[in-house]
Image (cartoon, rainbow, N blue to C red):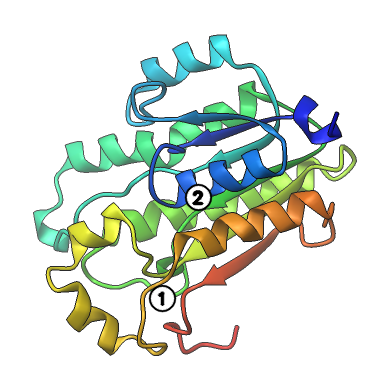
Amino acid sequence: MNLNSKKKAIIIGGSQGLGKSISENLKLAKFKVVACSRKEIDTSSITSVEKFLKKNNFADIVVLNSGGPPPMKFNDIKINDWKKYFNQLFLSYFLILKNLKIKKNGYIFYISSSIIKEPGNSLIISSSLRSAMSSLLKSYSLNNLKRGITVINIAPGPFKTKRVRELVSNLKKFEKQLPTGKIGDPNEIGKFVRFIVENKIKYISGSTVYFDGNINKSFL
């Protein structure tokens, strides 16, 4: 029996998009995969998260992943918008990290966004909360060095997912404007996660890896 088949991976948002690709690749690596849809855990609802944690209290790998808010101009954002997405993109993840035991030498992958490096003027809530969560994860990684838990922040640019289709009206025109001339393939991120865990790559912990097709011009 493959040793990985005894290990458990929980993928939040694992039923579609990037999460689904990660789930499929970890299954190929013989992990026991719990790929969660919004029915299993809705991170915008603290009650839903608490119920999920009662049934799932440990894992070897956890992937924190969920959709984001729609584009909104600064003056159009309401208090309730902040409250909803604060729960969805920050507080729920904090509760998962605090209450779900990650086994020794385990892995945490956070799917953030390349906008944490270069915020714009439309995805304000997303860039703000994902930047805050990235900061929290850095602290978490330092706090768990002795347990060998590897924490990697994956910051994607545009990928061929439902999320991009919600944000972009003309996908073909949008692709032509990208530096590579094409949108990202979700399977690349799935393969990356699989490569990290199968090869027991550890020294990368605390790092942010940008999968943005060279959209951001900064070299830092």
- Mark 2 lies on residue: 21
Give the image location of residue 160, x and y in percent. Answer: 34, 63
Question: In the figure, residue 103 lies in which quadrant?
Answer: top right
Instruction: Give the secondary structure at mark 1.
Output: loop
Total marks in image: 2
User: What amino acid is labelled 1 in the image?
Assistant: Glu
Question: In the figure, residue 209 lies in which quadrant?
Answer: bottom right
Of 11 and 150, nearer the camera is 11
Other-residue count near label 1 (Cα within 10 Å), few / some / many at <14 / 14–19 / ≥20: few
- Mark 1 lies on residue: 118
**In the image, is 65 to the left or to the right of 220?**
left
| Quadrant housing the C terminus | bottom right
**In the image, is 194 to the left or to the right of 4?**
left
Identity of the residue drawn at 55% across and 64% down: 188
Q: CA distance from mark 2 to mark 1?
A: 26 Å
Compared with residue 127, is residue 121 higher up or lower down, i.e. above or below? below
User: What amino acid is labelled 2 in the image?
Assistant: Ser
Identity of the residue drawn at 72% across and 36% down: 30
